[in-house]
Image: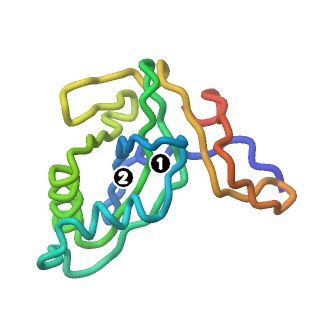
Amino acid sequence: MKIENMILPGKEEFDLREYRYIYIQSGNGKITKDNFVNIIASANSPLIPKKGGVLSENFIIITPDNKHFYGLSYSKDLIGWRQQIEKGIVILDLNIGEIKDGKYFSILNGEKYKLEDCQFERYNFYDETGNLIKSNTPVEKEKIL
């Protein structure tokens, strides 16, 4: 089964799920599960959300100035998870962005980019033959915009 088009996580809004992209500088250019766990755990006293959870979206938005933002989403207690993640971002001195109006990538520090000016990658996904692709793989803009 070959997938021609895919959905850019966060381009569409949903009632019980929100998407954010976190800028994490790493020496080797790779994100790990620990990066996201550290964001949540850094503000863990007590845990703010009462239900739901956080998932890595295995998707990267690369801004025109080459900053890599790694996607995550959270569900159910949107206000609680948003507060938990934003608190962790502040504690760890990271930056966070989100897709606005399906056309822009807006970063907390005030930077704003047209999605069409960004690049996109995904990782840890299965290709059309069922093989797990762990490496960062470019995504053609035409397939997600």
User: In the image, what residue occupies the spot 38% across and 44% down?
Assistant: 24
User: In the image, what residue occupies the spot 84% across and 56% down?
Assistant: 1
Give, as a three-letter code, the residue at label 2. Answer: Tyr
Q: Position of residue 44 (x, y in %)?
A: 18, 74
Is mark 2 in CB contact (under 8 Å) with mark 1?
A: yes
Q: Position of residue 17 (x, y in %)?
A: 35, 62
Whether residue 72 sits left or right of residue 6 in the image: it is left
User: In the image, what residue occupies the spot 50% across and 58% down?
Assistant: 32
Nearer to us in this view, 42 or 113: 42
Q: Position of residue 133 (x, y in %)?
A: 74, 54
In what quadrant of the picture does the C terminus appear?
top right
Near mark 1 (Cα within 10 A), the count class, few <14, some 14-19 or many ≥20, is many
**Residue 129 tag number:** none
Judging from the image, what secondary structure is the residue with disc 1 in?
loop
Q: Position of residue 22 (x, y in %)?
A: 35, 46
Nearer to us in this view, 20 or 25: 25
Estimate the spatial distance between the alpha carbons at disc 2 and disc 1, rounded to whole Å. 7 Å
Q: Which residue is mark 1?
A: 9
